[in-house]
Image (cartoon, helix red, strand yellow):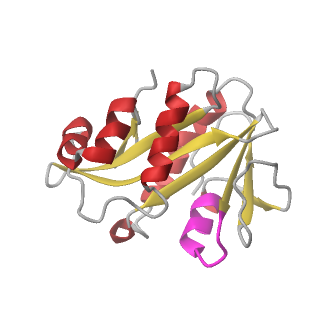
Amino acid sequence: MTLPLQTRRLTLIPATREILSAELDARDRLSRLLGATVPATWPPPLMDEGVIREFLRMQDDPAGPLCATWYWVLDDSGTGTRTLIGNGGILRAEGAPDTAVLGYSVLEEFWNRGYATEAVGALLPFIFSLPGITRIIATTYPDLPASIRVLEKTGFVKTDEVPAGAGAEEGTLCYLREKQGPVSDRK
C-alpha cells in the first residue's frame, strides 16, 4: 500500500477502492475518508464518473496496467482546516513499459498558487522509484500556460516524441521528464 506523501502545504492521499467508491456516491463519506472538506465545486476538470470507474476497474485487475492516483489536500496551518483541492496520478504508457503518463487537475479557485508544482514535485521521486520507470510523459494544451509552467518548473521539457498510449490528444503539447539521479523540486 502506498503511503500519503507530505509537502510543505499539501497531503497527497493515495486513492483506494473505498475512496474512489465514496467519490461516486457519498460526498460526506469522501470528506471523512480524506479528513478534509470537499468543496461544492468538486470534481476538477476531467475527473468525471467514467474516469473514476476506470480507476476502480484498474485497481480490481491485479495483472492490469500500472495506475496510481492521489487526492491533494491543502493543509491550512493558520486555520487548522483541510480542503480537497485537486488530484493527480499516473498510468503506464501502452507499448512503453519504461514510461509513466502523468495527469493532474486542480479546482479553479486554487489555480496559480503553486499547489500543482508542489504536488507534481512530490510525486516525481515516487514515480521514478517504481520498477522500470525511467521516463514520465505529460500532455497539456497550449492555451493552459499555468499547466505548462508546472511541467517546466518540475523539470519537464517539451518533446515531439509521444509514445503510443501517452494520452496525447489532437492539439496537445507533450512534455518529457527523464530519470537523472536524485529528483528534486526545481524552482
Quadrant (top left/top right/bottom left/bottom right) for the C terminus: bottom right
Q: Does residue 5 lie above or below 162 as drawn?
A: above
- Residue 119 seen from this side: no
Q: Where's residue 70, x and y in %?
A: 44, 41
- The number of numbered badges drawn on the structure is 0
- Residue 17 seen from this side: yes
Q: Residue furthest left?
A: 79
48 is within the stretch colored magenta: no
Q: Where's residue 64, x and y in %?
A: 63, 27
Residue at position x 45%, y 46% in the image: 52
Q: Where's residue 53, x and y in %?
A: 46, 43
Q: Is residue 47 left or right of residue 109?
A: right
Q: Which picture quadrant has residue 42?
A: bottom left
Q: Is residue 22 left or right of residue 162?
A: left
Residue at position x 69%, y 23% in the image: 131
149 is within the stretch colored magenta: yes
Bounds of the magenta segment: 140-151
Looking at the picture, tell me which residue is in the foreground, 2 or 120: 2
Q: Residue furthest bottom?
A: 143
Residue at position x 15%, y 48% in the image: 80
Quadrant (top left/top right/bottom left/bottom right) for the N terminus: top left
Q: Is residue 82 left or right of residue 17?
A: left
Q: Where's residue 36, x and y in %?
A: 22, 46
Q: Which picture quadrant has residue 95?
A: top right
Looking at the picture, tell me which residue is in the foreground, 182 or 96: 96
